[in-house]
Image (tube, helix red, strand yellow):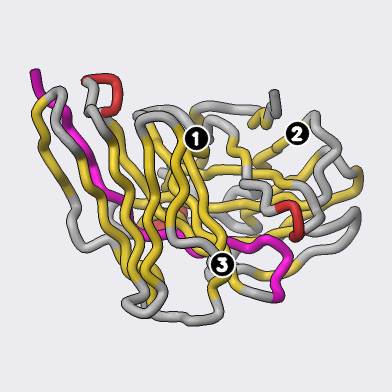
Amino acid sequence: DVKVTQSSRYLVKRTGEKVFLECVQDMDHENMFWYRQDPGLGLRLIYFSYDVKMKEKGDIPEGYSVSREKKERFSLILESASTNQTSMYLCASSQGDRALNQPQHFGDGTRLSIL
Amino acid sequence: DQQVKQNSPSLSVQEGRISILNCDYTNSMFDYFLWYKKYPAEGPTFLISISSIKDKNEDGRFTVFLNKSAKHLSLHIVPSQPGDSAVYFCAARWTGTASKLTFGTGTRLQVTL
């Protein structure tokens, strides 16, 4: 079974702080993703990575950056947290071969509150 | 611009009956579609998928139908069970991207006794 582990289930930070959200997967997946989920808006892609040290912007990258130094770990960074970044953050991973049509597997999420 | 739309925010169905969840998309470049189920305080769990070369895929109580001409897919759950109560998201993958998915806004299904 694929396991995607997010380091914190709940996190409370203050505006202006630099915030790190960590995600680790144990299935040697090439692709990793960060989403945020907000009521009425579904899941929106922030950033993704298809290889170590590679990253691409998703649909809402503003105010965020990412780091992928090792294949199994993908970090989301809020450079200067703001209240509109209060949300549920979800990490996912998937195999790199598109031909296999494999789904993304998600962690349990981090509920982040910015005060 | 919402490329994947779930127009029903909620649905209530009696136990034992059929649940039908709908999803519409606008981009004809999508080539792979998925349904995920999400319980509160948990991450989404993959349920079932369908490639654009097929029009139906079945897995136990779950069947997904794809109508490419109408750009519409649906998830049928038969029979519905109380444990199926959750939020369901449909998602679509764009041809030529590295497995990037676009998600709908979700439909909350409640299965009543």
Disc 2 designates what residue?
A24
Q: CA distance from mark 2 to mark 3?
A: 34 Å
Q: Amino acid at mark 2?
A: Val
Point out residue A115 in the picture as x, y percentages from the top left corner: 41, 44
Side (left or right) of A44 relative to B99: left
B25 shown above or below B76: below
Q: Amino acid at mark 3?
A: Ile
Residues at marks 2 and 3 on the same chain: no
The one of A19 and A58 positioned closer to us in this rendering: A58
Disc 1 designates what residue?
B45
Chain letter, disc 2 residue: A
Question: Can residue B78 be spotted in the picture?
Answer: yes
Q: Which mark is residue B13?
A: none
Look at the image and tell me in which quarter the N terminus of chain B lies. Answer: bottom left
Which residue is painted at 29% across and 33% down in the image?
B86
Side (left or right) of A69 relative to B51: right
- Mark 3 and mark 1 lie on one chain; the one further toward the N terminus is 1
Q: Secondary structure at mark 3?
A: loop
Q: Can residue A100 be found in the magenta stretch?
A: no
